[in-house]
Image (cartoon, rainbow, N blue to C red):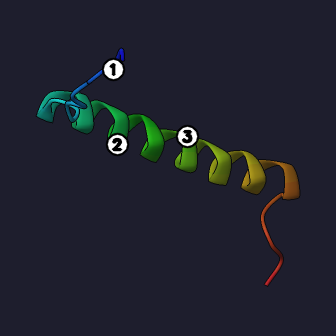
Amino acid sequence: MKAEIALAKGKAEHDKRNTEKKRDWEREKGRLMRHKVSGPSKE
């Protein structure tokens, strides 16, 4: 019988920070684009 065993290793701390920065930028970019497309609201 053949079995494969693999250990999952979490992301390194600097990788997590980089991923989080990228995610925040994507969210901010989406917000800016939506605002730009819809134009400033006339309130």
| 23 left or right, relative to 36 | left
Q: Position of residue 26 (x, y in %)?
A: 55, 40
Name the residue carrying label 3.
Answer: 26
User: The disc labelled 2 sits on which kind of residue?
Assistant: Glu
Circle 2 Cα neighbour tier, 10 Å, few/some/many (<14 / 14–19 / ≥20): few
Q: Is residue 12 above or below residue 36?
A: above
The quadrant where residue 14 appears: top left
Q: Position of residue 16 (x, y in %)?
A: 25, 37
Q: Earlier in the sequence, mark 2 or mark 3?
A: 2
Q: Is residue 26 above or below residue 9?
A: below
Q: Residue at x 32, y 19 (%)?
A: 4
Q: Secondary structure at mark 3?
A: helix
Using the image as rendered, state which of residue 35 and residue 27 is in the foreground.
27
Using the image as rendered, state which of residue 11 and residue 5 is in the foreground.
5
Name the residue carrying label 1.
Answer: 3
Instruction: Please tell me how many numbered marks the rendered image carries.
Output: 3
User: The disc labelled 3 sits on which kind of residue?
Assistant: Glu
The quadrant where residue 18 appears: top left
Label 1 and label 2: CA atoms lie apart by 36 Å
Using the image as rendered, state which of residue 20 and residue 39 is in the foreground.
20
Circle 3 Cα neighbour tier, 10 Å, few/some/many (<14 / 14–19 / ≥20): few
Name the residue carrying label 2.
Answer: 20
Q: Residue at x 23, y 37 (%)?
A: 17
| 41 left or right, relative to 4 | right
| 34 left or right, relative to 26 | right
Q: Quadrant of the C terminus?
A: bottom right
Q: Secondary structure at mark 1?
A: loop
Q: Residue farthest to the top?
A: 2
Front disc: 1 or 2: 1
Q: Is residue 6 above or below residue 37?
A: above
Q: Earlier in the sequence, mark 3 or mark 1?
A: 1
